[in-house]
């Protein structure tokens, strides 16, 4: 029973580069959520997606950040022109349906910006 | 707006003692709460949840109590073990947007002393 899979586990980028974070939800789950966690803080919601649809992106920064969940393949969180402040752990969670709880989390991608 | 907060950032207990971790919430309309455990370098792991029609729910060595009058919930861990050392978060899916946006508190670091 594979859980939520995220890759890479660690990602290092220089300022101005692009970062791509991938998330494969649990088998049978079609709802994906992305959260960001800064050191010593709780997780902050970024975006909620279903297959081919963005349902709620109220936590996404207005610029440079985008997310998708295509019909085939993993969900992708893309950060363009990264800055030092983007350094954080990014977690993905999935659920079977809109009201099914709890959300199950992956082990995250640690993004470091040089 | 909604907020979920933890009373103490760090809790130290002796192995074998009981641990109590507290959480306050602000939205009286919140009807579902989740406790997560996060070990270093890993994603949040579901521990136990409770709905607002309940005051108490028990799991294996864990109990969650919900006091809707004062908008407070607690996580009790019986016979705390070294493996319980982690950061514990309460989370609230919220009531806006269909309740999919988890709001996390900042967490309580539980340290188990041998």
Image: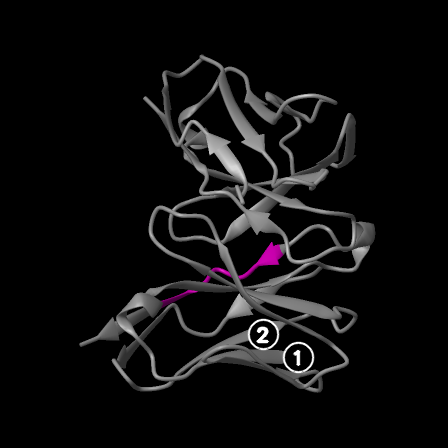
Residue A51 in percent (x, y) is at 76, 30
| Residue in view at x 64 percent, y 54 percent | B102
Q: Which residue is mark 2?
A: B24
Which numbered dot is residue A47? Answer: none
Looking at the image, residue A90 lies above or below residue B99: above
The quarter holding residue A11 reads top left
- Depth order, front residue of B86/B47: B47
Looking at the rendering, the stretch of residues picked out in magenta corresponds to B103-109
Does B106 lie within the magenta span?
yes
| Residue in view at x 40 percent, y 84 percent | B78
- Depth order, front residue of A104/B14: A104
Q: Is residue A109 left or right of residue A35?
A: left
The quarter holding residue A54 reads top right
Point out the image quarter for the C terminus of chain B: bottom left
Residue B112 in percent (x, y) is at 26, 73
Q: Is residue A107 left or right of residue B110?
A: right
Q: Secondary structure at mark 1?
A: loop
Q: Which residue is mark 1?
A: B71
Estimate how packed mark 2 is, as few (under 14), some (14 to 19) or many (20 or more) residues with alpha carbons within 10 Å: many
**Numbered disc 1: what chain?**
B
Estimate how packed mark 1 is, as few (under 14), some (14 to 19) or many (20 or more) residues with alpha carbons within 10 Å: some
Badges 2 and 1: C-beta atoms under 8 Å apart?
yes
Q: CA distance from mark 2 to mark 1?
A: 6 Å
Looking at the image, residue B38 lies above or below residue B71: above
Point out the image quarter for the N terminus of chain B: bottom right
| Residue in view at x 62 percent, y 31 percent | A61
**Numbered disc 2: what chain?**
B
Q: How many marks?
A: 2
Residue A45 in percent (x, y) is at 62, 45
């Amino acid at each position: 029973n594979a859980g939520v899979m995220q890759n890479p586990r660690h990602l290092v980028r220089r300022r101005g580069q692009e970062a791509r974070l991938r998330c494969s939800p649990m088998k049978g789950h079609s709802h994906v959520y992305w959260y960001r966690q800064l050191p010593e803080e709780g997780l902050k919601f970024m975006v909620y997606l279903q297959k081919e649809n963005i349902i709620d992106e109220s936590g996404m920064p207005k610029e440079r950040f985008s997310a998708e969940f295509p019909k085939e393949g993993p969900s992708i969180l893309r950060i363009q022109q990264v800055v030092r402040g983007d350094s954080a752990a990014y977690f993905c969670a999935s659920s079977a349906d809109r009201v099914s709880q709890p959300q199950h989390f992956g082990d995250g991608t640690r993004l470091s910006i040089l | 707006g909604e907020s979920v907060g933890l009373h103490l950032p760090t809790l130290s207990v002796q192995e074998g003692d009981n641990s109590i971790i507290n959480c306050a919430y602000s939205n009286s309309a919140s009807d579902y709460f989740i406790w997560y455990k996060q070990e270093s370098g890993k994603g949040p792991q579901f521990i136990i949840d409770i709905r607002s029609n309940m005051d108490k729910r028990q799991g294996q060595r864990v109990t969650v109590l919900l006091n809707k009058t004062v908008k407070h919930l607690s996580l009790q861990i019986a016979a705390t073990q070294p493996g319980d050392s982690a950061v514990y978060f309460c989370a609230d899916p919220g009531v806006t947007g269909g309740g999919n946006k988890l709001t996390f508190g900042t967490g309580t670091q539980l340290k188990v002393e041998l």
